[in-house]
Image (cartoon, grey):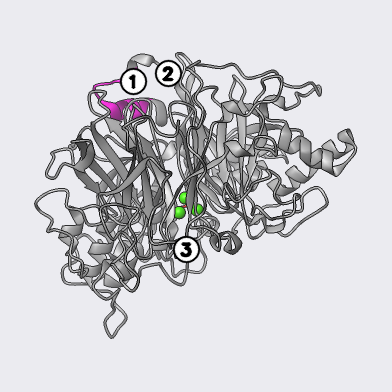
């Protein structure tokens, strides 16, 4: 739907082999092996990760089960698609609205006004706009009291202001409007409690907090203090202001939240056409910004060039005299300690600078490194992971100083980018100064040092020959066996097709998964499910989806603690939007097995185990999900709805002819009998 800041355009001009060609060869090798394309597709669809061939062509043994909880099975029936101004859940479930845009977090904010009349100061003390990734942090282990931390990804200017955005005769945006927009972005920490069986926000709780595109944040890791991030605001390059366009999220094993900066380049402009290479590669515009915040520069109320900094055109004698480096302080993973309101957010630069969709931890094991996965969401961009230098110490799970623990595991380590081979294997290429390109050139010769590599992470990944992917969105880690899943939402710039891979343009997307080797340097992969229309040709509908589970553009995705995989969509595929609004499906990969007990992908025999659980209102995207430790409450975000919410009950639509000012919101899903979800 409307994505004012959304820009996933193809900017990869490397000649690295794209994923579609890798898959083509993967399939055609099996065509040769199995004798026909049909068999190749059957094999692709029917033999899972655990069935991948090893390098000698033998089936790989089943992955070890790290934990063995009681197996769960889905206990609800898939619901049909829906196209209404309401949410839909299965019978026996309730869905209600929590913390919509504008909900006051403390008494400094006035109540949300239906005419759009709240001030910038109100907005700084209230829930932001366009909810996305989120995480629930229990307090004292409670399933009924905790902190819900939520990204506010971007804004709908038309809904935010009484009559949309305005400009003066010279084209300048009013400072008050710009500040309101800046304050509607970022992250919120909300104390929430279940009272009488129903969750509510605790107004004025001392842990309630907002981070916006104006909040001062620390820079940490290899870029801290480097010449790349010195600005007039921070001549020593140690701090910056704000986080922006926080899309997917993550969390750490030591109790902090990770916000991920995705479409941040779109708030900056560099009028000097000779862009630095990192700015060209990431997509800084020389012509326009999404909201024209820079036009408020020079307003009499402006403090510390709070608006001027979005115009990064070099103007001063050095980087310390202007904001040429302001955009170099964006594009990172941002660590937040939600438990301590006195702390600043910290940008962990060691995890790379790109359009981070999310950042999900792998399973932790004592004395092994801590691993984080992160996709770069744009056409033909890459999949990354970070491996800590410090081995995991379980005593760090509940530290006194969470951000010091973050520094221990996230400021020193190695960033890798993925290369997928066509035999179901893959390698992680290290983005380090001594790493060699296929031509034998060390990255240090191209990017100087580690800070230079991280600043232009995409460029360094190009040089190493990483595999361009179909828009990597969220990653998820199966708590039962450590398999990692990645949503590849779609890729309209794909034009090549052949008999083995007829999905030109990949309009529906798919979900890939892999398992890393113990040394973290390689992996084996397969494709878990292909999005498709139910009625599509089998060569397109490779997972044999039906009306009850057809989907496109998988995006948000997470496992709950029982091994249920929840998949959310951000659907741009017209033929599917004609059938249903964006949705959330559930599947338990551990239950999809072959006769030998090996996990297999979604296929014609088992596709009924992929079930539609939730459908959102017209115009929305369903994104962001969190669970309480008892799996009796699920939080799901509705972003950019068209005419919703109308009532506290998220399943009630506005009467025909009634238009409400739309508000993104969290939806709380519970079973009406109070039981565990989904089973
Ligand atoms: Fe903000 Fe990639 O979706
Ligand atoms: Ca997304
Ligand atoms: Ca998306
Ligand atoms: Ca999105």
How packed is label 2: few (under 14 Cα within 10 Å), some, or many (20 or more)? many
What residue sits 16% from the left and 68% below the top? 301
In three-dimensional space, the C-alpha distance between marks 2 and 3, rounded to whole angstroms, equals 41 Å
Q: Secondary structure at mark 3?
A: loop
Q: Which mark is residue 1?
A: 3
Residue 446 picture location, percent across and down? 60, 45
Q: Is residue 183 rendered magenta in the image? A: no
64 on left or right of 646: right
How packed is label 3: few (under 14 Cα within 10 Å), some, or many (20 or more)? some
Point out the tag, 1 or 2, that comes first from the N-terminus: 2
The dominant secondary structure in magenta is helix
Q: Secondary structure at mark 2?
A: loop
600 on left or right of 453: right
Give the label, 1 or 3, closer to the camera: 3
Point out the tag, 2 or 3, that comes first from the N-terminus: 3
Q: Which mark is residue 392?
A: 2
The part of the chain drawn in magenta is 396-408
Residue 612 picture location, percent across and down? 51, 45
The residue most toward the bottom is 169
Q: Is residue 401 rendered magenta in the image? A: yes
Q: Which residue is mark 1?
A: 397
Badge 1 residue CB within 8 Å of ligand 2: no
Q: Secondary structure at mark 1?
A: helix
In three-dimensional space, the C-alpha distance between marks 1 and 2, rounded to whole angstroms, equals 9 Å
Q: Which quadrant of the figure has residue 112? A: bottom left
């Amino acid at each position: 739907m409307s994505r004012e800041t959304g820009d996933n355009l193809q900017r990869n001009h490397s000649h690295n082999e794209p994923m579609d060609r890798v898959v083509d060869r993967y399939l055609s090798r099996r065509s040769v092996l199995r004798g026909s394309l049909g068999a190749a597709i059957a094999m692709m669809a029917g033999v899972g990760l655990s069935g991948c061939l090893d390098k000698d062509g033998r089936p790989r043994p089943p992955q070890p089960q790290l934990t063995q909880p009681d197996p769960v099975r889905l206990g609800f029936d898939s619901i049909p698609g829906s196209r209404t101004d309401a949410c839909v859940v299965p019978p026996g479930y309730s869905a209600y609205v929590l913390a919509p845009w504008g909900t006051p977090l403390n008494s400094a904010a006035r109540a949300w006004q239906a005419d759009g009349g709240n001030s910038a100061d109100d907005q700084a003390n209230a829930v932001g706009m366009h909810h996305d990734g989120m995480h629930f942090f229990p307090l004292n282990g409670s399933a009924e009291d905790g902190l819900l931390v939520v990204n506010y990804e971007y804004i709908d200017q038309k809904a935010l202001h009484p009559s949309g955005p305005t400009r003066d005769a010279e084209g300048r945006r009013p400072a008050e409007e710009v500040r309101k927009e800046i304050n509607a972005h970022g992250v919120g920490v909300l104390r929430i409690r279940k009272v009488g069986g129903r969750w509510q926000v605790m107004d004025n709780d001392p842990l309630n907090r907002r981070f916006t595109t104006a909040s001062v944040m620390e820079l940490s890791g290899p870029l801290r203090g480097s010449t790349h991030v010195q600005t007039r605001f921070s001549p020593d390059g140690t701090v910056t202001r704000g986080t922006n366009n926080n899309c997917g999220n993550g969390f750490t094993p030591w109790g902090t939240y990770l916000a991920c900066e995705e479409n941040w380049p779109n708030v900056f402009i560099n009028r000097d056409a000779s862009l630095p290479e990192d700015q060209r590669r990431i997509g800084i515009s020389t012509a326009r910004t999404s909201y024209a915040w820079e036009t408020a520069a020079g307003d009499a109320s402006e403090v510390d060039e709070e608006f001027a900094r979005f115009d990064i055109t070099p103007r001063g004698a050095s980087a310390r005299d202007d904001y040429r480096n302001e955009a170099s302080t964006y594009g990172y993973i941002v660590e937040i300690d939600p438990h301590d309101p006195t702390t600043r957010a910290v940008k962990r630069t060691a995890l790379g600078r790109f359009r981070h969709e999310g950042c999900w931890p792998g399973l932790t094991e004592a004395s092994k490194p801590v691993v984080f996965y992160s996709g770069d969401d744009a056409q033909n961009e890459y999949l990354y992971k970070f491996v800590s230098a410090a081995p995991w110490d379980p005593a760090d799970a509940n530290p006194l100083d969470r951000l010091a623990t973050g520094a221990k595991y996230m400021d020193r380590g190695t960033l890798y980018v993925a290369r997928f081979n066509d035999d179901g294997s893959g390698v992680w290429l290290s983005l380090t100064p001594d790493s060699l390109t296929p031509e034998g050139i060390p990255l240090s010769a191209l990017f100087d040092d580690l800070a230079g590599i991280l600043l232009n992470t995409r460029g360094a990944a190009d040089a190493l020959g990483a595999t361009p992917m179909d828009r990597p969105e969220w990653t998820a880690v199966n708590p039962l066996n450590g398999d990692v899943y990645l949503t590849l939402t779609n890729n309209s710039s794909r034009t090549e097709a052949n008999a083995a891979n007829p999905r030109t343009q990949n309009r529906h997307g798919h979900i890939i998964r892999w398992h890393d080797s113990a040394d973290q340097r390689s992996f084996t992969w397969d494709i878990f499910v292909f999005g498709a229309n139910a009625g599509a040709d089998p060569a397109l509908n490779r997972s044999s989806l039906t009306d009850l589970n057809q989907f496109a553009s998988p995006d948000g995705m997470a496992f709950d603690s029982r091994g249920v995989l929840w998949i959310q969509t951000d659907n741009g595929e017209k033929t599917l939007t004609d059938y249903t609004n964006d949705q959330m499906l559930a599947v338990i990969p551990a239950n999809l097995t072959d006769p030998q007990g090996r996990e297999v992908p979604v296929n014609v025999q088992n596709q009924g185990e992929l079930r539609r659980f939730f459908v959102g209102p017209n115009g929305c995207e369903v994104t962001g999900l969190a669970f309480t430790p008892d799996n009796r409450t699920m939080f799901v975000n509705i972003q950019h709805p068209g005419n919703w919410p109308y009532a506290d009950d998220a399943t009630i639509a506005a009467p025909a002819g009634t238009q409400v000012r739309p508000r993104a919101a969290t939806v709380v899903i519970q079973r009406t009998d109070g039981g565990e979800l989904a089973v």
